[in-house]
Image: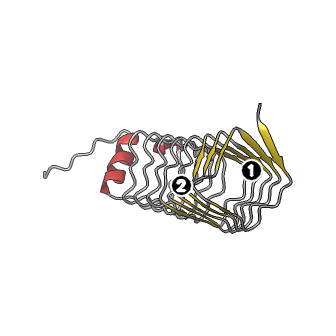
Amino acid sequence: MTAEIRDEDWYGEELGGDTRHQDVRFVEVDLTEVRTTGATFERCTFERCRFNASVHEATAFVGCTFGACNFFDATLVGCKLTGSTFARCTLKPLTVRGGQWRGVVLRGADLTGQDLSGVDLRDADLSMAVLIGATLRGADLGGAELREADLTDADLRGASLGGSDLGAAILSRARVDLAGAVLLAELTGAVVDVSQA
Protein backbone atom coordinates (compact mmCIF):
# COMPACT_ATOMS: atom_id res chain seq x y z
CA MET A 1 0.00 0.00 0.00
CA THR A 2 1.32 3.43 -0.96
CA ALA A 3 2.00 5.80 1.92
CA GLU A 4 0.80 9.39 1.59
CA ILE A 5 2.24 12.67 2.81
CA ARG A 6 -0.21 15.53 2.33
CA ASP A 7 -0.17 19.29 2.97
CA GLU A 8 3.09 19.23 4.94
CA ASP A 9 5.51 22.14 5.25
CA TRP A 10 9.10 21.02 4.64
CA TYR A 11 10.31 24.56 3.92
CA GLY A 12 14.11 24.78 4.20
CA GLU A 13 14.56 21.20 5.40
CA GLU A 14 17.89 19.44 4.79
CA LEU A 15 17.62 15.83 3.62
CA GLY A 16 20.79 13.71 3.48
CA GLY A 17 21.76 10.26 2.32
CA ASP A 18 19.76 8.61 5.09
CA THR A 19 16.55 9.94 3.51
CA ARG A 20 14.84 7.24 1.46
CA HIS A 21 11.23 7.25 0.29
CA GLN A 22 9.74 4.44 -1.76
CA ASP A 23 6.22 4.26 -3.20
CA VAL A 24 5.18 7.43 -1.35
CA ARG A 25 2.56 9.86 -2.64
CA PHE A 26 3.36 13.50 -1.85
CA VAL A 27 0.37 15.84 -2.25
CA GLU A 28 0.71 19.65 -2.02
CA VAL A 29 3.88 19.39 0.06
CA ASP A 30 5.91 22.61 0.35
CA LEU A 31 9.53 21.74 -0.49
CA THR A 32 10.56 25.35 -1.05
CA GLU A 33 14.28 25.92 -0.35
CA VAL A 34 14.74 22.27 0.64
CA ARG A 35 18.32 20.96 0.25
CA THR A 36 18.83 17.29 -0.55
CA THR A 37 22.21 15.57 -0.75
CA GLY A 38 22.28 11.92 -1.74
CA ALA A 39 18.61 11.39 -0.87
CA THR A 40 16.59 8.72 -2.69
CA PHE A 41 12.99 8.86 -3.90
CA GLU A 42 11.91 5.73 -5.74
CA ARG A 43 8.57 5.27 -7.54
CA CYS A 44 7.15 8.26 -5.67
CA THR A 45 4.37 10.53 -6.91
CA PHE A 46 4.50 14.29 -6.38
CA GLU A 47 1.24 16.15 -6.96
CA ARG A 48 1.08 19.97 -6.87
CA CYS A 49 4.27 20.15 -4.79
CA ARG A 50 6.47 23.25 -4.63
CA PHE A 51 10.20 22.77 -5.22
CA ASN A 52 10.85 26.51 -5.59
CA ALA A 53 14.47 27.54 -4.93
CA SER A 54 15.30 24.02 -3.73
CA VAL A 55 18.77 22.51 -4.28
CA HIS A 56 19.33 18.82 -4.99
CA GLU A 57 22.81 17.29 -5.20
CA ALA A 58 23.44 13.65 -6.18
CA THR A 59 19.82 12.93 -5.30
CA ALA A 60 17.86 10.15 -7.04
CA PHE A 61 14.27 10.55 -8.22
CA VAL A 62 13.94 7.16 -9.94
CA GLY A 63 10.70 6.18 -11.64
CA CYS A 64 8.89 9.12 -10.03
CA THR A 65 5.91 11.05 -11.37
CA PHE A 66 5.67 14.84 -11.00
CA GLY A 67 2.26 16.34 -11.73
CA ALA A 68 1.63 20.11 -11.75
CA CYS A 69 4.73 20.73 -9.59
CA ASN A 70 6.63 24.03 -9.48
CA PHE A 71 10.43 23.94 -9.88
CA PHE A 72 10.90 27.72 -10.17
CA ASP A 73 14.57 28.56 -9.52
CA ALA A 74 15.39 24.98 -8.42
CA THR A 75 18.88 23.50 -8.86
CA LEU A 76 19.69 19.89 -9.78
CA VAL A 77 23.36 18.88 -9.61
CA GLY A 78 24.37 15.37 -10.67
CA CYS A 79 20.91 14.00 -9.98
CA LYS A 80 19.46 10.73 -11.24
CA LEU A 81 15.97 11.08 -12.70
CA THR A 82 15.91 7.83 -14.64
CA GLY A 83 12.43 6.89 -15.82
CA SER A 84 10.68 9.83 -14.17
CA THR A 85 7.74 11.68 -15.73
CA PHE A 86 6.97 15.41 -15.63
CA ALA A 87 3.47 16.56 -16.57
CA ARG A 88 2.17 20.15 -16.46
CA CYS A 89 5.16 21.24 -14.34
CA THR A 90 6.78 24.68 -14.20
CA LEU A 91 10.42 24.01 -15.06
CA LYS A 92 11.75 27.54 -15.61
CA PRO A 93 14.11 28.85 -14.59
CA LEU A 94 15.87 25.64 -13.64
CA THR A 95 19.60 25.13 -13.08
CA VAL A 96 20.85 21.72 -14.18
CA ARG A 97 24.46 20.54 -13.92
CA GLY A 98 24.98 17.09 -15.38
CA GLY A 99 23.06 14.09 -14.18
CA GLN A 100 21.37 11.01 -15.54
CA TRP A 101 17.95 11.70 -17.01
CA ARG A 102 17.73 8.51 -19.06
CA GLY A 103 14.20 7.64 -20.15
CA VAL A 104 12.74 10.75 -18.52
CA VAL A 105 9.39 11.91 -19.95
CA LEU A 106 9.24 15.65 -20.63
CA ARG A 107 6.60 15.50 -23.33
CA GLY A 108 5.37 19.01 -24.18
CA ALA A 109 7.49 20.62 -21.44
CA ASP A 110 8.51 24.27 -21.77
CA LEU A 111 12.30 24.26 -21.53
CA THR A 112 12.88 27.49 -23.43
CA GLY A 113 16.41 28.78 -22.91
CA GLN A 114 17.35 26.03 -20.46
CA ASP A 115 20.95 24.84 -20.19
CA LEU A 116 21.01 21.03 -20.25
CA SER A 117 24.68 20.71 -21.21
CA GLY A 118 26.19 17.31 -20.48
CA VAL A 119 22.93 15.76 -19.27
CA ASP A 120 22.35 12.07 -20.08
CA LEU A 121 19.02 12.20 -21.92
CA ARG A 122 19.24 8.83 -23.67
CA ASP A 123 15.84 7.40 -24.57
CA ALA A 124 14.12 10.48 -23.11
CA ASP A 125 10.72 11.53 -24.45
CA LEU A 126 11.05 15.16 -25.50
CA SER A 127 8.29 15.03 -28.09
CA MET A 128 6.52 18.39 -28.50
CA ALA A 129 8.84 19.93 -25.89
CA VAL A 130 9.73 23.59 -26.38
CA LEU A 131 13.52 23.83 -26.39
CA ILE A 132 13.84 27.18 -28.17
CA GLY A 133 17.28 28.62 -27.48
CA ALA A 134 18.16 25.72 -25.17
CA THR A 135 21.77 24.63 -24.72
CA LEU A 136 22.36 20.90 -25.11
CA ARG A 137 26.12 20.96 -25.66
CA GLY A 138 27.65 17.60 -24.87
CA ALA A 139 24.29 16.12 -23.89
CA ASP A 140 23.56 12.50 -24.79
CA LEU A 141 20.35 12.37 -26.81
CA GLY A 142 20.89 8.86 -28.13
CA GLY A 143 17.53 7.23 -28.86
CA ALA A 144 15.61 10.28 -27.64
CA GLU A 145 12.07 10.90 -28.92
CA LEU A 146 12.11 14.38 -30.49
CA ARG A 147 8.95 14.30 -32.57
CA GLU A 148 7.72 17.90 -33.02
CA ALA A 149 10.21 19.15 -30.42
CA ASP A 150 11.01 22.80 -31.11
CA LEU A 151 14.80 23.17 -31.15
CA THR A 152 14.81 26.56 -32.87
CA ASP A 153 18.08 28.39 -32.05
CA ALA A 154 19.17 25.50 -29.81
CA ASP A 155 22.85 24.67 -29.37
CA LEU A 156 23.46 20.98 -30.14
CA ARG A 157 27.21 21.16 -30.64
CA GLY A 158 28.99 18.16 -29.16
CA ALA A 159 25.69 16.40 -28.39
CA SER A 160 25.38 12.67 -29.08
CA LEU A 161 22.45 12.35 -31.46
CA GLY A 162 22.69 8.77 -32.76
CA GLY A 163 19.40 6.93 -32.78
CA SER A 164 17.33 10.04 -31.99
CA ASP A 165 14.51 10.96 -34.37
CA LEU A 166 16.02 14.39 -35.01
CA GLY A 167 14.46 14.47 -38.47
CA ALA A 168 11.01 14.88 -36.86
CA ALA A 169 12.10 17.93 -34.82
CA ILE A 170 11.96 21.65 -35.64
CA LEU A 171 15.59 22.68 -36.15
CA SER A 172 15.44 26.21 -37.54
CA ARG A 173 18.77 27.97 -36.87
CA ALA A 174 19.87 25.18 -34.49
CA ARG A 175 23.65 24.98 -34.13
CA VAL A 176 25.27 21.61 -34.77
CA ASP A 177 28.84 20.40 -35.17
CA LEU A 178 30.14 18.40 -38.14
CA ALA A 179 28.90 15.07 -36.76
CA GLY A 180 25.44 16.56 -36.25
CA ALA A 181 25.42 18.06 -39.72
CA VAL A 182 26.33 14.69 -41.24
CA LEU A 183 23.55 12.98 -39.28
CA LEU A 184 21.01 15.56 -40.42
CA ALA A 185 22.13 15.21 -44.01
CA GLU A 186 21.74 11.44 -43.83
CA LEU A 187 18.26 11.81 -42.32
CA THR A 188 17.20 13.74 -45.40
CA GLY A 189 18.52 10.98 -47.65
CA ALA A 190 21.68 12.77 -48.70
CA VAL A 191 24.89 10.83 -49.22
CA VAL A 192 27.72 12.52 -47.36
CA ASP A 193 30.97 12.34 -49.32
CA VAL A 194 33.94 14.00 -47.64
CA SER A 195 36.47 12.78 -50.20
CA GLN A 196 38.20 15.32 -52.40
CA ALA A 197 36.95 15.54 -55.97
Whole-percent x, y for residue 42 in the image? 63, 42
What amino acid is found at the position of numbered circle 1 in the picture?
Arg
Q: Is residue 104 left or right of residue 44?
A: left
Where is mark 1, residue-wise? 88
Name the residue furthest left. 197
What label does residue 134 carry, if any?
none
Q: Which numbered disc, 1 or 2, marks the residue closer to the eye?
A: 2
What amino acid is found at the position of numbered circle 2 in the picture?
Cys
**Nearer the observer, 195 or 164:** 164
The total of numbered circles placed on residues is 2
Residue 76, picture quadrant: bottom right
**Nearer the observer, 73 or 159:** 73
**Nearer the observer, 59 or 119:** 59
Where is mark 2, residue-wise? 79
Q: Secondary structure at mark 1?
A: loop
Whole-percent x, y for residue 146 in the image? 54, 44
User: Residue sitting at 77 percent across and 51 percent down?
Assistant: 68
Colouring rule applied to residues: secondary structure
User: Residue sitting at 61 percent across and 40 percent down?
Assistant: 63
Q: Is residue 41 left or right of residue 183?
A: right
Q: Is residue 90 left or right of residue 126?
A: right
Whole-percent x, y for residue 56 in the image? 60, 61
Name the residue furthest front. 18
User: Residue sitting at 46 percent across and 62 percent down?
Assistant: 155
Whether residue 125 is situated above or below residue 197 in the rendered picture: above
Q: Is residue 23 left or right of residue 127?
A: right
Label 1 to label 2, Cα distance in Å? 21 Å
Q: Secondary structure at mark 2?
A: loop
